[in-house]
Amino acid sequence: MLVKSMRTLADMRGDEPLTAAYRAGLRSRTYRTASLNKPATAPEVIPVTTGDGAKLRVHAYGPADGDIIVLIHGWSCCIEYWNPQINAFADRYRVLAYDQRGHGESTLGSNGPGAQTLADDLEAVLAATLPLGKRAVLVGHSMGGITLQAWASRYPEQVTRRASAVLLANTAARDIRYETDLLPLFNKPLMMASRPVTVLGATVRVPLVIAETALAAPVPLPGGWPVSAVFKARVMSKPATRDEVDFALGIIRSCRPLTRGLHAAALADLDLGDAAAHLTVPTTVIAGAEDHLLPERMSRPIVEALTRAGHLADYQVWPTGHLGNIEAAHRFNTLIADIAERANPSEAVAG
């Protein structure tokens, strides 16, 4: 019901063209940290239209004949979220990234977001961008990791055809509504709490609908230092730099409020079960010890499913928050390089 009513509001308001330039500006700010800035070389733009009419923005960086890395962003993000990785790999790898439907410059299409659209959109992008016979290292962060699991479950015959290896970062498969710790006073009803929250010695609980409204409300996310401070405390880790916080918050603020709300409502109900077992290529999972949005414990069912299926390559828990590829960019890039080298041993490692 929440998704349906929000969808109706989206149709009434359209694509918010008056704020498109402002959103684009948030995605293209310049920072002292060079790796956070947009790549120096303009990308090849590959238009992709899905079966329900969503127009996806797809960018390709690097040599056309290079081994391929595909980057799949998470909730409220966009292609530019991956700047630290694009800048690290585009000199010698073919790096592909796309705006998930409704995010960045992609449109929503006629179907509401969910496991099927996440999977179908990824398959459409891979079909349009991967040359015949070429496989890619597929990297998914947060909702991007959910996308990879949904795709593998819906298109199991394509996994070994399209992918040489997979990296799932800061992600989950189910129970997001009840397990997220992002809003510690709101996130769990009294009878479902795994860790009681106390204020002045008393347990505090707010009805679940308030938490869902807070996360899914289609309202703009404000800026300013108070928001940055809360964002760093709840989404990132203490060592995160000011540039990293400003970059990440700018990316998230650039997301259309209606898109953010529609996807939050859909993800709250998502249950992929053991879909990760369909990732029948070497799959690495990383989680953040300080991740409040999708806590480390939410990665464990994925790890267990991959272990049972015999495809878990590695499981690592890092001392980061939810944005591991930004907070620990060098380590993240080194991991991708190692995975890509093992998947394509003839390719030199990216710097």
Image (cartoon, grey):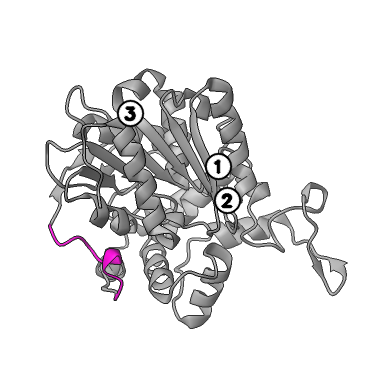
Q: Secondary structure at mark 1?
A: loop
Distance from Cα at disc 1 to Cα at disc 3: 22 Å
Image coordinates of residue 85 in percent, x first then y, are 30, 53
Residue at the image point whose x is 44% and y is 62% from the top: 327
Using the image, determine if residue 75 lies above or below residue 110.
below
Asked whether 122 or 334 is in front, the reply is: 334
Residue at the (46%, 69%) spot, across then down: 221
**Circles 1 and 2: CB atoms closer than 8 Å:** yes
From the top left corner, tell me how far across and down residue 261 is, in percent.
49, 55
- What SS does tag 2 mark? loop
Q: Is residue 105 left or right of residue 301?
A: left
Q: Earlier in the sequence, mark 1 or mark 3?
A: 3
Q: Secondary structure at mark 3?
A: strand
Residue at which label 1 appears:
172
- Residue 219 belongs to the span the image colors magenta: no
- Decide whether residue 35 is among the magenta residues: yes
Name which residue type carries label 1: Ala
Amino acid type at mark 2: Leu
Question: As shown in the figure, which amino acid type bears the numbered disc 3?
Answer: Ser
Q: How many angstroms separate mark 2 from mark 3 (CA)?
A: 26 Å
Q: Are marks 2 and 3 in contact (CB under 8 Å)?
A: no
**Residue topped by disc 3:** 164
Residues packed near mark 1 inside 10 Å, few (<14), some (14 to 19) or many (20 plus): many
Q: Residue 321 at x, y = what percent?
A: 53, 59
Q: Residue at x 37, y 17 (%)?
A: 157
> Distance from label 1 to label 2 (Cα)?
7 Å
Give the labeled residue for mark 2: 294
Q: Residue 116 or 298: which is nearer the viewer?
A: 298
List x then y, in percent, for residue 75: 45, 52
Closer to viewer: mark 2 or mark 3: 3
The magenta segment: 32-41
